[in-house]
Image: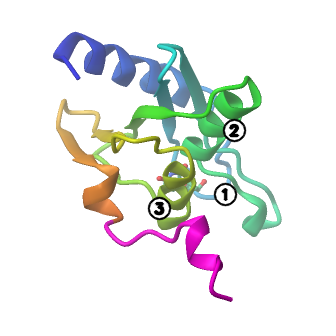
Amino acid sequence: MNIPEQDGLIDAARAARESAYAPFSNFKVGAAVLVSSGRVFTGCNVENASFGLTVCAERVAIWKAVSEGEREIVAVAISVDGKPAMPCGACLQVMQEFAGDSSPVVIAAGSDGEVIRYTLAELMPHAFEEFQQEGK
Ligand code: THU
């Protein structure tokens, strides 16, 4: 991914963070997902008084993309205040579901300009996949 595209995705994640609903943790997260058609979908974390119902920003963005017919994630940018934050394991597994043939790039951006970048394969080298259920 070239740098202007990455910067645009980080900007979209940063803007999405403004909508974060995080009254319980006060940790606001924004995400932006670039899919194979070239469209970008954004999300923010949405918390709940029943804490376990909280959904991460990454998954909100991915649900939006998939519900609009998209099936292949190219890159995911995540924006937080402070140091860059990596996606949780649940979100990595959801990214894996829509990883396509080339591993999506995960771009974690902090508020001071620091950016950490990995492929999903680097973060999740032995992910569970559907075919693994065949032997059950
Ligand atoms: N959170 C995200 O939205 N994305 C992550 O990658 C990690 C955690 C949210 C969930 C919860 O609302 C808050 O951050 C604290 O865990």
- Mark 3 vs mark 2, CA separation in Å: 16 Å
Point out the tag, 3 or 2, that comes first from the N-terminus: 2
Q: How is the image coloured?
A: rainbow
Which one is nearer the viewer's eye here, 15 or 7?
A: 7
Indicate whether 75 appears above or below 34.
below
Q: Which residues are magenta?
A: 125-136
The residue type indicated by label 3 comes to Cys
Q: Residues within 10 Å of mark 3 (few under 14, many from 20)?
A: few
Q: Looking at the image, is mark 1 or mark 3 nearer the viewer?
A: 3
Side of 128 relative to 117 (left or right) = right
Can you tell which of label 3 and label 2 is closer to the viewer?
2
Q: Amino acid at mark 1?
A: Phe
Left or right of 32, for residue 104: left
In the displayed image of the protein, which residue is found farthest to the right? Answer: 50
Residue 58 colored in magenta in the image: no
Residue at 30% over, 44% down = 82
Secondary structure of the residue carrying tag 1 is loop
Task: Answer whether labels 1 and 3 touch (C-beta < 8 Å).
Answer: no
Q: Is mark 1 within 8 Å of ligand 1?
A: yes
| Residue 118 image offset from top left, x and y in percent | 23, 48
Crowd class of label 2 (few under 14; some 14 to 19; many from 20; radius 10 Å)? some
Pick whichever of labels 1 and 3 is earlier in the sequence. 1
Examine the rendering and report whether any part of residue 83 can be seen. no
Seen as rendered, the residue at the extreme bottom is 136
| Residue of label 3 | 88
Residue 103 place in picture, x, y as percent: 34, 45
Residue 43 placement: quadrant: top right
Is residue 3 depicted above or below 42 in this figure?
above
Left or right: 136 as drawn, with respect to 17: right
